[in-house]
Amino acid sequence: MGMKARAALLLGLWVAVLAALLPFAARLDDVKSDKETDYLPAAAHSTLAAELEATLPGGTSNVFLVVYERDGGVTAADRAAAAAHYAALRAEYGSATGPEQPLSSNDGRALMFPVLVDQSHGETAEYIEQFRARVAEHPAGLTVQVTGPGALSADFEGAFEGIDEQLLIVTALVVTVILLLTYRSPLLWLVPLLAVAGANVAAMAAVYGLAKVFDVTVNDQGAAVLTILVFGVGTDYALLIVARYREELHHRAEVAGAMLAALRSAVPAIAASAATVSLGLLCLLAADMNNMAGLGPVGAAGIVCTLLVMVTLFPALLVLCGRRIFWPRIPHAQNAVGTGTTLWDRVGSSIARRPVAAALASVAVLALLGLGLLGNTEPLSRADQFVTTPESVTGARTLAAHFPERAGTPLLIMTPNSARAAVLRAAEADPGIGAAEAGRTGPEYSEITAIPRASADSPAEYATIERLRAALPALAPGTVVGGPSASNLDIADASQRDRWVVIPLVLLVVTIVLGLLLRAIAAPIGLVLTVVLSFGSALGASVFLFEHLFGFAGLDAGLILLAFLFLVALGVDYNIFLVSRAREEAQRHGTRAGMLRSLAVTGGVITSAGVVLAATFAVLVTLPLVALAQIGFVVAFGVLLDTLLVRSILVPALALIAGDRVWWPARLPEPAPRREAELVAR
């Protein structure tokens, strides 16, 4: 069987496999979940409180707060409208707790009432519009807002509505434009795009299987990152394969032979890249945060599926298309290749003349950017998670202005039934609590709702939560304090712990993979250090821009860990592509000439790959949630920084300074003197 026949058979097999996987990929939404406990650490107070609340009659309840405001003071008509709304909502949603009438503020300008909605009504996002419609009719001049934890949760879930389709379309368009600009061919861009689309189907089906079989946590954030990873990394692999394939087509008459030679050269580096990113992602399994632990296998499955598709289906498509796919710049055998001086030849020559100066200048730029870390790195509050302010957030501000004793987000205290009265008295006596009341009682546990005096997610509110968590379990063992603000506190604490555990694991894994690939010790350690420096610089510059340009109030709790993971794993990718080629060339021509030749040959394709990956992550900046916008910006900026500065200047400069010591403890064979002189003279 000829090579083209084998390529056709492989294409047919992939079409059959993808057709079989498509129904499973389409059901990924069925296994996605954005429940509070899908994000929280498993053993946290807030997680335990949510689980205990589910055992109460009616299950988990969502608290909504309706607040009315009139600048000149509320009128009798306003009070009548609020009372009618309150009665209608309590009747419709079955809320039996709360005051008999709407509460009036001390300044006479606002009214409010709470409504507890149990889980039988479904997810908050499913009925929030209907809920808000019930209070839409009111006297002119009266402002009515629905806020509280339930509304905030609904607005958060609503921000993800249609996000998968939007992300897929925008990402595909971005990749298409970049491929058109890179290849300047009306046909070639379509082949990698089709292959990456197939990889995305395979990845979605694989993640669906992980969720069904192994109960892996999959949420909207993880699904968004999956799409970006598959398109970004898949396009990078395509660029590298095409670059090697084009080289071989200049030396071989047979298309299939050229592809086999290209794959023999490119696949080891691509496989090492995929292993680095996949193993780095799997380090997230050591995280306490449920959403982080779930993202590990989700992302790793995406990378593995992308690797399989791009080293099998994609080459088969190129072989079947033949040389004509490169039209109008069709590569032919025996064409002169590499003549003349390219941009990357000139860059390499400049670095070779003053490697120490190039290295010091690069480090100085990175250190300057890193000074941004002195800015605001405080964790975001729940209210600051949105790029544009929703009604639940503006309503919370209105509530805090007129009801300062209810400025905080309600805390959920779950306590054994026998201790309910004592725990209620202790909660009411705490100086940080403005009001507390007993709620439902279950077989073993009762709920108590406590309203902090301090504003939501403030240091004072956190201090109140920690004080209650220290005092109440001592009074009644088994008592736990949860609720939205308590969850945010647990997330911040768990995220800090995860950084200390996962980051060293990632560094160890990446260094080992590099060591196995390069069969060296010095080079892997040096490469990892350059990428860590690049990460700090990218994060510092981003913190400065987030604070002074974007106006973000802080950093998402998971940003540092995710940014580190992606920038180190993906940044090392480009160093793998550069240094593995440099080692290959160094075995024939020596370290100095090998690095310069590697930079000249790979500079253009690696830069294109970096631009593609940065552009795909930058798509996340267009989404309405700060967490996704921040991770998208940091990774996009960091990938560009790593591609254009670290990989293009700093790494070659350090390699030239170190010389053969970069491969320690391995020793390379002596190069051919004549060839080395030719390369250095270029």
Image: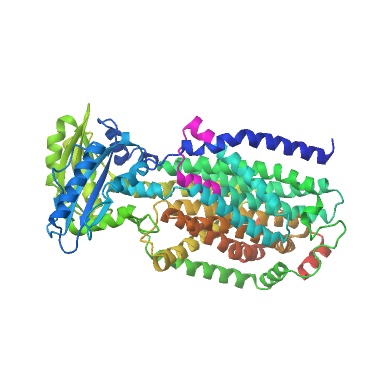
Identify which residue, 2 or 572, lies in the foreground: 2
Horizontally, residue 414 falls left or right of residue 320, namely left
Residue 464 image point, x, y percent = 21, 50
Residue 668: in sight, yes or no?
A: no
Instruction: Point out residue 661 in the picture as x, y percentages from the top left corner.
Output: 66, 58
Magenta stretch: includes residue 225? yes
Residue 415 in which image quadrant = top left
Residue at image position (69%, 37%) is 14
In the displayed structure, 324 sits above or below 290; it is below
Magenta segment: 208-227
Which residue is located at x 43 percent, y 46 percent? 501
Residue 511, how many percent across, how many down? 57, 49
- Vertical position of residue 197 compared to residue 644: above or below: above
Between residue 45 and residue 4, name the one nearer to us: 4
For the N terminus, give its image quadrant: top right
Where does the C terminus fall, quadrant-wise?
bottom right
One can see residue 326 in this view: yes
Q: Which image quadrant is residue 334 in?
A: bottom right
Location of residue 522 with respect to 59 vertically, above or below? below
User: Image point 44% across, 47% down: which residue?
Assistant: 161
